[in-house]
Image (spheres, rainbow, N blue to C red):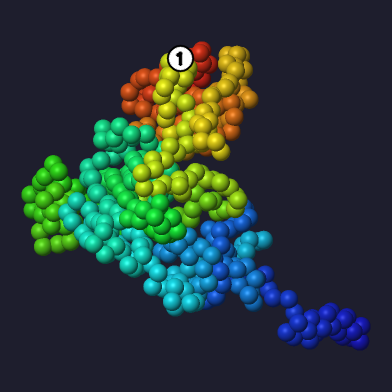
Amino acid sequence: MKKTLLYFIILLLPLTLLAGCGNNARPSLEDRIGEVGQKYPASYEGVIERLKSLDVYQQGTHQLVTQDRGTLIIQSPSVDLNEYLGKAVLVKGTLEKGIGDAKDVLTVSNISYVDDSQSAELQAYENQAFGFKFSHPSTWIVKESQEGLSLSLAETKVLSITVFSDQTDLTAFVAGREKAQTAEVTIGAQKALRIITGTQMSFYVPNPPKQKIYLIEYTPTINSVDDKTGADAEREEFYNLLDTFELIYLNQTEGEKCGGMKQIKCPEEQVCQLESDGKYAEGVCAPVGGQASQSNCPFIAPPSNCNQYRIAEYNQKGCPSLYKCIEEGADAQASSYRDLNAVGVKEASTGYYEESFDDKTDKPVEGAETPGEEGGISADGSTELTEKAYTVPDVSAVTGVYANARRGFSLLYPKSWYFASFGAIDGALWKVGFANAEFEESSASLITLSITKEPGGSAYKKIGDVYYVLDGPADLKPVMQKMADSVEESQ
């Protein structure tokens, strides 16, 4: 009996010691797991900067540098954080615990300047019918019309935004209106085209889900010869407006399209709910006495540590579903509408140019210049043109494998080459570029693969009801033919 009692006491002793540890005991596994993903309301003061480090496992698009709490990772689906870069602000939102080694992330819902005097610098403007929003200097007066709007300083117009409806092909639309050279830039996470005529800068910006194209035209009101400081300041205000220019996707109205240039009628027992009172206003069909349904686009975080990014894909409801990073790294130099900071009165900027090449011979077209991202204007004012240089690879070198899980296909390409996927652009269902050096723009591809509904190009292969079209210089046709022959769709 004594032995049995002693044995029981020995077994009980460790449990008693553990219980005596009290509050010093380590939290249970369940409690520790419960912390991950927890969300708490929070507010911080600090200066907003771009995210300086790239981590595929880390959420967030910007960072907030505080005096007492160090650096905090932040993001926001409703506030344009780029508008507040370098500013001392108070942010409020929801702090979410990070998973593993990932840092906590604050999703910002409200932001304000620490210095109240700065709040009057910019004024927000939003137009659901036109499909865009931006911020502008509070001294600029907005005047709306059926075709768009204008912004004026006193009685002098600074810029105008014209809205063109029922337009889906940016390149074709601009080519049909303009003869001047165009340069590709990014505005509102979209591929946009810039044109410079004398002192005026024009930008064509598409809104694919709403089938609209916006023409933004800026004309300086200050003569840079008389007042260079004032002209530079005004141009910087215009650039800041472009920085904040966003397309509106939230509260997309669902239903059959009606009205517009084609004056589309609704089915019986439905009425057309127009977006405005304009002659060619658009709308959607809704039940008589009822309202068209609304849907909100989910927040898709853009790539972290990305100076410029574009929307690469939309879902069936017209919401952005995938972004593509144009320039990575905190110090990356992305091509921008700010490249031309020397535009003055009676001073036509020549921009930066690369030679134009004949599609069939790949030889420079004499006297022709097209905007690009290579070459430029040298210090002495002469034009520096960049010529494409490559060696035609042997067909036997076409052994690299490119596989696209999103579209479900694969093909071979020159093994030592690079590739980049550009998504649904230029009228193609999907477009991929291949080149002998690293590149980021579709125009820099030596060979392009486009998934289309029609045959064409230098070589193609039809699978089902689509064509895989390869296009490029004539001397690369044997390479493109082998690439086309190798196309296979995933089962």
The furthest residue to the left: 268
Q: How crowded is mark 1: few (under 14 residues within 10 Å), some or many (20 or more)?
A: few
Q: In this view, does 79 lie above or below 478?
A: below
Amino acid on which disc 1 is placed: Thr
Image quadrant for the N terminus? Answer: bottom right
Examine the rendering and report whether any part of residue 66 can be seen.
Answer: yes
Point out residue 422 in the picture as x, y percentages from the top left corner: 46, 37
Q: In this view, does 225 lie above or below 31?
A: above
Secondary structure of the residue carrying tag 1 is loop
147 on left or right of 136: left
The furthest residue to the front: 226
Residue at (56%, 72%) from the top-left corner? 46
Point out residue 243 in the picture as x, y percentages from the top left corner: 42, 55
Residue at (39%, 43%) from the top-left corner? 347
Which residue lies under the disc numbered 1?
A: 361
Residue at (43%, 55%) from the top-left corner? 228
Point out residue 161 in the picture as x, y percentages from the top left corner: 27, 52
